[in-house]
Each structure stands twice: as structure tokens, then as C-alpha cells.
Amino acid sequence: MIEKSWIGRELKPSVLEIERGRLRSFARAIGETDPVYQDVEAARAAGYPDLPVPPTFLFAADLDSGALDAMLADMGIPIARILHGEQGFTYHRPACAGDVVTVTSSIADIYDKKNGALDFIEKRSEARNQHGELVAEMRTVIVVRN
Amino acid sequence: MSTEIPSGLAPGRELPPLALEPVNRALLAMFGCASGDLNPIHLDIDFARKAGMPDVFAQGMLGMAWMARAITAWVPQDRLRKFDARFLGITHLGHRITVTATVKDVVTFNGETCARIELRNTNQHGQTRIAGEALVAVG
């Protein structure tokens, strides 16, 4: 059982600089061939100032920064025991290469199922660009196998 | 509240499916680096076995990124308002995923008319691995 007192705890903010090269690597890894995601001219023709961040990319922020690992370590949860249960995004405005996105996350809920065999941690995050504008909200449910 | 259904978005309409190549280890390494998910359970067979898994397996977010591809192949990404996924079962090495998408209904979200799209990642054995839902502005 994970202590419910972790509910409300904020993670260290994650700052993600959006780079063209990283976006191209991401597009290649997921097999995305739409030129909007790889070719700056195609992105501009589609109305973006630069390569747009694809829909699920911002999940990287709390991973890159180590904020998620630090949260699990603080809670005493080995990374070998976690699975991704649910993920949600609500979109407000695009982010593009050249933007600097800051993600602030907190633990929104903790609950268990199957008589404690599984614990669930719900993390909620806000992603804002360098102008302080809301880019996306994210919701992550992590399952812990006990 | 009744929302008029724009033409072509009748509930039950199926969107073009997206068929992926079977999952292999190189793909997991490439996606791990690009996505930031370097949990060794997806990359290192020794670690995966110690964790009680038969082998490494796909990052959940790889499957969700495939779902997103199916959406943005159909509508420009700036129409996407909301996207949720539930990871129901592990996508193992060798699984050949097909993303299917169906228009469920048309709803109003933050004052906008949106098509609600139901998405599924299914492997070659007919098992649903990820269930998703997306709201796409159609106004």
C-alpha cells in the first residue's frame, strides 16, 4: 500500500526544450511519414511556425528531467514494478520546435485494487510554453504491481 | 442537448485503419531514446526477466503514438482537442498491431462540435491491447 499522504505532492518542474532533431527521431521511431512532422517547409505550409510537437510527445518531459524517477524513488517504488495504466491529453495550443515547455505535475490520487495487489498513482500535469500559455494538460495513471 | 451531425461523420463510420509492422527489439530501443522512456523493462531482457516478465515488451506510449498517427492521418492535428488511452494488455515482441478507429457520436466540448472517435490497438490474435478515445473538432 502506498501512503495516501503523497496525494497533492508536487514533482520538480520539468523543462523540455523542443528540438527539431528530437522531433524527427520521434517521428522516425513511430513510423510517422507525414512531412509536417519532419520538414520545416511543410510544417510552415500547414500554418505552424516550425515542426509541431506530435500529440503524445510531451509525455517525455517528466521522463527526460528525471522527475518521474525521483517521484518513484521518494515513494520507494522500484521501476521494475510499474506499468502504464492510462494516459490522457487535453490540448490547448500547439507547441513547436524552438519552444521551451515547462511541465508541472502533482500526484492527484492514490488508490488500490484487488485487495492491495495493485496500487494506482494518478499524476496530473500542465504543460506551458515560454510565454506562460497553456499548451496541454496531461493525466497519467501508473500501476504498481505489489 | 442535441447536436447536429456533420455530413460524413455518422456514428459507426470507420476511419482508415493503420497496420504496423511486428514489434521488435530495435524498435523499442529507438522509441525509448526518442520518447524518453528508458525504463530497462522495455530494453534489457535480463532486467525484464528479473521483473517477472518473459521478455522485454513495448512501451505503452509507443502504441498510443500509433493511435495518434491514425488520428492525424485523418484530420490535421490542430483539430485534436482531447485524447485518452487505457492500456489493457501488454504489447509483446512479435505483436502486429492494427489501429482501428470508429466515429462514436458527435458531442459538444468546450462549446465546440467534436466527433468522438473510438480507437483500438488490436494484435494479430484479435486481442485489444489499448483502448482509446479522441475528440476532434469538426465545426
Image (cartoon, rainbow, N blue to C red):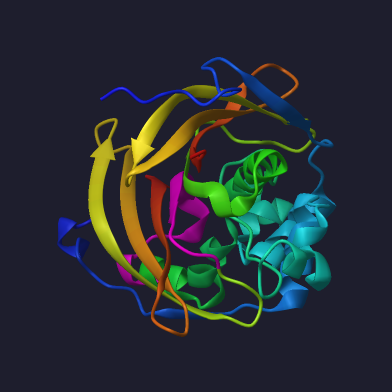
| B121 sits to left or right of A34 | left
Q: Is residue B104 visible?
A: yes
Determine whether, in the image, residue B85 is placed left or right of residue A54. left
User: Which residue is depicted at the point 31% across and 22% down?
Assistant: B2
> B34 or B113, which is in the foreground?
B113
x and y, in percent, of residue A141 in the image: 39, 48
**Which of the image's four quarters has the C terminus of chain A?**
top left
Between A5 and A11, the residue placed more toward the observer is: A11
Vertical comparison of B73 with B31: above or below = above
Assess whether residue A80 is covered by the magenta stretch. Answer: yes
Q: For the point 23% across and 52% down, which residue is it? A: A109
Displayed quadrant of residue B114: top left
Above or below A134: residue B127:
above
- Residue drawn at point x = 46 percent, y = 70 percent: A69
> Could you tell me if residue A1 is visible in this image?
no
Query: From which residue to which does the magenta span run?
Result: A73-94
Of residue A5 and residue A39, the one placed in the foreground of this image is A39
Q: Is residue B93 above or below residue B78?
A: above
